Image (cartoon, rainbow, N blue to C red):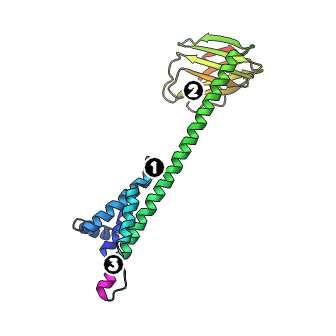
């Protein structure tokens, strides 16, 4: 028959059947040792799933190692029924302690990796933002910059600054009505009958400053309202259309 004390790990991991779960639940109400063991294993597992936990607390590791080192008096080796039970308890306690150490170490490793990736992503975002700001400034200061502006009939204003020498431009949208749910503003650079997407405004936005690439040779800049996610070509009449050069 399975020693009910040995079900602690399986109980925490929900690896028991309904009969074992009910039996261990009743046992847990009266067994302080199993209660502590279950609480420690649940704490380690919760920390493994917690992205805000950086490293396992030293106290946890020290307590686990102390638990292991303090168990030798129960090592298996004594004959008879009591010796076998003591051996089972010793193996169970060491296994639980080892599991806690592994879970705690894994939690620290996984969370450290996540935090490192977040730092790298943040640095990349900051670098990209600084580069974009510098490019916008260069367009606005370009000696060949051409400025076009126009009002949107429903309200708001659109301004385009284009530099053929840099092959870049800047679109400034302000005061446009916020599109309804599921719709966004999409920007276009148009040459002849071909419209190339120049970007989407985030949902719920009617104002933005957008860096435009590839303005050289384009004739018109336009803004349309499109389904969220954008369209491959304009599906509505442009709210405003401005000459690029």
Q: Is residue 224 above or below residue 37?
A: above
The image shows residue 218 at horizontal and vertical percentages of 75, 20
Horizontal arrangement in the rendering, residue 218 relative to residue 176 (left or right):
right
Give the labeled residue for mark 2: 201
Name the residue nearer the viewer: 79 or 29.
79
Q: Nearer the viewer, mark 1 or mark 2?
A: 1
Q: Is residue 82 magenta?
A: yes
Q: Residue farthest to the left?
A: 30
> Which residue is located at x 33 percent, y 89 percent?
79
Q: Horizontal placement of 65 versus 36: left or right?
A: right
- Name the quarter where the N terminus is drawn: bottom left
Left or right of 3? Residue 223 is right
Q: Is 79 drawn above or below residue 210 in the view shown?
A: below
Mark 1 to mark 3: distance in Å? Answer: 35 Å
Q: Earlier in the sequence, mark 2 or mark 3?
A: 3
Where residue 200 sits in the image (x, y, percent)?
60, 28
The residue that label 1 is drawn on is 54
Please report the bounds of the magenta region as a residue range. Answer: 80-89
Q: How far is disc 1 from disc 2 in space, using C-alphas?
A: 36 Å
- Hey, which quadrant is residue 143 in on the image? top right
Query: Which residue is more in the foreground, 34 or 180?
Result: 34
């Amino acid at each position: 028959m399975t020693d009910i004390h040995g079900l602690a790990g399986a109980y925490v991991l929900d690896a028991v059947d309904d009969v074992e779960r009910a039996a261990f639940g009743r046992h847990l109400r009266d067994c302080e040792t199993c209660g502590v063991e279950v609480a420690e294993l649940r704490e380690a597992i919760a920390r493994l799933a917690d992205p805000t936990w950086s490293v396992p607390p030293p106290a946890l590791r020290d307590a686990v190692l102390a638990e292991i080192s303090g168990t030798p008096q129960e090592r298996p080796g004594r004959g008879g029924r009591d010796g076998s039970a003591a051996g089972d308890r010793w193996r169970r306690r060491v296994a639980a302690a080892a599991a806690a150490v592994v879970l705690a170490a894994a939690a620290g490793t996984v969370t450290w990796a996540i935090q490192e990736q977040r730092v790298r992503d943040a640095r990349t975002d900051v670098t990209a933002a600084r580069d974009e700001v510098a490019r916008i400034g260069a367009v606005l200061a370009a000696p060949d910059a051409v400025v076009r502006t126009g009002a949107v009939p429903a309200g708001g204003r659109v301004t385009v600054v284009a530099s053929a020498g840099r092959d870049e431009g800047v679109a400034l949208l302000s005061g446009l009505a916020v599109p309804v749910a599921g719709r966004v503003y999409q920007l276009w650079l148009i040459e002849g009958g071909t419209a190339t997407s120049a970007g989407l405004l985030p949902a719920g936005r009617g104002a933005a400053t957008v860096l435009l690439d590839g303005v050289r040779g384009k004739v018109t800049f336009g803004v349309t309202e499109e389904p969220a996610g954008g369209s491959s070509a304009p599906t509505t009449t442009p709210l405003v259309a401005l000459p690029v050069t």
